[in-house]
Amino acid sequence: MRVIEHIAKATGPLFSYEIVPPPRGRSIKDIIEVVETLAPLNPPWIDVTSHSSTTYFQEKVDGSIQKRTLKKRPGTLGICGIIQNRFKIDTVAHILCLGFTREETEDALIELSFLGIENVLALRGDTPNFQKQVRPERTINNYASDLVGQIKGLSEGKFLDELDRADSLNFCIGVAGYPEKHFEASCLKSDIQSLKRKVDAGADYIVTQMFFDNNKYFKFVEQCREAGINVPIIPGIKVLRSANQLKNIPRNFYIDLPEELVDDVENNPEHAAEIGKRWCRKQVEELVNHGVPSVHFYVLNDVHSIVDIVRSFK
Ligand code: FAD
């Protein structure tokens, strides 16, 4: 089922989850265990992130340096197929512009449709990953709005080549939104204009970057509505786990942490996980009472805290 159908049919709070494929070389076992842990919560859908190749240098035993370009976390499509077909849980595959040609994207979308997957989250990705030289006969999407346009086109049977008797591919399309603005945007207003471009190109819903202050989300939704964005805006939430994350989260995700949370963790670093969980539960409670379309949890390595939080609402 499509994400927007889940939202439309919901009779109580919805909780969705985002998981990350294992690093290259590791078995699928760990991620299956995460899905098995989430399955009893009856997730309406689970997102699986996508990772383009990164280039890095590796020292070989003879001392020479080898340049390698590889995906550090391959497997998005395969994992989506397992969740959808073995666990019968609707799956949202993340699809990136950067690191992929439009031709590769079309192939991936065909594979997803063959796997019975009806949902994708269309993202640009981040520039350091974009190392691949694009041959002149290949094309790329620069922004997520271009990618949304490509995916939407397939629902009208518009493949890159004109095909005889092509069936359309109908995906429910999500895009990313940033309550504290995307780090490259000059201001929140212009970032919301970029978000509107994605919705105008055909996005059906928005999932936000994580935030730890609900007021930022409420204000963002208000500003999006004023800008004429009318699709569901799903809040993205993460549980803070350690005192180190007080530095890492703002640095990696370009967001602020509330002073009250920072003070509490700094004064009691050994209880950081407990404080983070309590904070998250309070955030979720307020969001649910506010009637948000769903709460989307960034699971990362912390499935058990999330299970505890969600169980307390069931
Ligand atoms: P865009 O919407 O393309 O915007 C990127 C920047 O360009 C913004 O500053 C925007 O304001 C600006 N912009 C947009 N359109 C234009 C235009 N036409 N002209 C000028 N400026 C423009 N990354 C991964 O690698 N894999 C994942 O699986 C993944 N999942 C994510 C899930 C969520 C819910 C979120 C919030 C982020 C995720 N990311 C993921 C990170 C994402 O790829 C980065 O945040 C990336 O920097 C921006 O992606 P976007 O789709 O928001 O880009």
Image: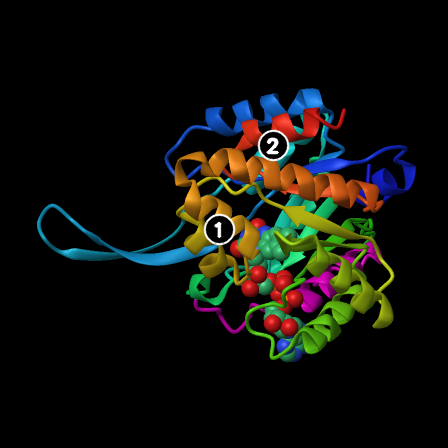
Label of residue 146 in the image: none
Residue at 63% x, 55% y: name it: 209
Amino acid carrying label 1: it is Asp
- Left-right relation of 276 to 179: left
Label 2 belongs to which residue?
A: 306
Q: Earlier in the sequence, mark 1 or mark 2?
A: 1
Residue closest to the eye, 148 or 9: 9
- Picture layout, residue 87 above or below residue 252: above
Quarter of the N terminus within the rendering: top right
Q: Residue at x 45, y 35 (%)?
A: 271
Report whether 65 appears left or right of 166: left
Q: Is mark 1 within 8 Å of ligand 1?
A: no
Image spot of residue 121 (x, y percent): 68, 51
Of 99 and 166, the residue lying toward us: 99
| Three-letter code for the amino acid on which mark 2 is drawn | Ile
Helix, strand or loop status at disc 2: helix
Residue 158 is covered by the magenta coloring:
yes
* Residues rendered magenta in the picture: 133-161
| Image coordinates for residue 283, horizontal then vertical, percent | 68, 44
The residue under the point 9% across, 53% down is: 63
Considering every residue shown, the one lying at the far left of the view is 62
Return the x and y of residue 207 as percentages of the image width and height.
71, 52
Query: Residue 144 at x, y = what percent?
Result: 66, 65
Give how far apart the Cα atoms at labels 1 and 2 are: 23 Å
Identify the mark at residue 263; answer none if there is no mark. Answer: 1
